[in-house]
Amino acid sequence: MKTILFAGIISAGILTLLSFNTSTKTLYDFKAKTLDGQDFELSSLKGKKVLVVNTASKCGNTPQYAELEKLYKQYGGDKFTIIGFPANNFGHQEPGSNNDIKEFCTKNYGVSFPMMSKISVKGDDMDPLYKWLTMKSENGVKDAPVEWNFQKFMIDENGHWAGVVANGTSPMCDTIVNWIKGTK
């Protein structure tokens, strides 16, 4: 009887561990709203590598919109996409409304990759997606707090956190391009 009870405890421990490992979230567990206010299921991106970028219209890094658009035009499609998340967390560099952001991105950079509604990427009101992107306890891989506008998170085709690239680094850098092409 004691042996069976002991085996039960071991089994319960293993089941708990397995349950913990399978509960790690993926990108597909989140939803967003587009700049137009439409629901956007991130699960619709299954099978694609995704570059998630927090953006701002009045930042020294804002010209990266042009590079992001170039990257999207070159590699975007069935296997890769970019998603922009405007945020006003750094120096109040994204003060406009969603309509203002859409007009700015379209007029100045011809942005055609998906842009989501403005969110918070740090602090007490941090969006749940960014909690997952920035906290090892959520993504299971690494703590990677957002340090400024245009930080880039790489998500693999299975929705798992795959890496982060600093805000000042070009979206066309070898790290990102080689990741997209699968030639790390």
Image (cartoon, helix red, strand yellow):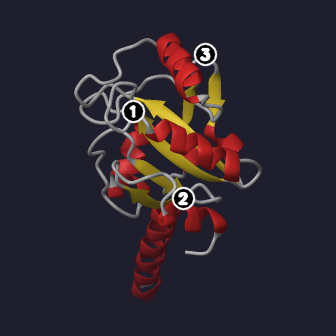
Q: Position of residue 65 (x, y in %)?
A: 50, 37
Q: Mark 1 near mark 3, Cβ–Cβ under 8 Å?
A: no
Q: Where is residue 7 in the image (x, y as percent from the top left)?
A: 46, 83
Q: What element carries label 1?
A: loop
Q: Quadrant of the C terminus?
A: bottom right
> Is any part of residue 131 visible from this angle?
yes
> Dot 2, how many residues are within 10 Å of its Cα: few (below 14), some (14-19), or many (20+)?
many
- Residue in view at x 34 percent, y 16 percent: 95
Tag shown at residue 160:
2
Please indicate whether residue 2 sits to the left or right of residue 46 in the image: left
SS for callout 3: loop
Residue drawn at x 50%, y 19% as measured from the top left:
104
Q: Where is 172 relative to 4, above or below?
A: above
Q: Which of marks 1 and 3 is nearer the N terminus?
A: 3
Residue drawn at the location 54% of the way across and 43% of the way down: 68
Specify the amino acid type for callout 1: Asp
Quarter of image, res 111: top right
Labels 2 and 1: the sequence-earlier one: 1
Residue named by callout 3: 36
Q: Distance between the residues labelled 2 and 1?
A: 18 Å
Of callouts 3 and 2, the N-terminal one: 3
Indicate whether 170 appears above or below 30: below
Residue marked by disc 1 = 127
Q: Around disc 3, counting alpha carbons within 10 Å, would you say few (fewer than 14), some (14 to 19), or many (20 or more)?
A: few
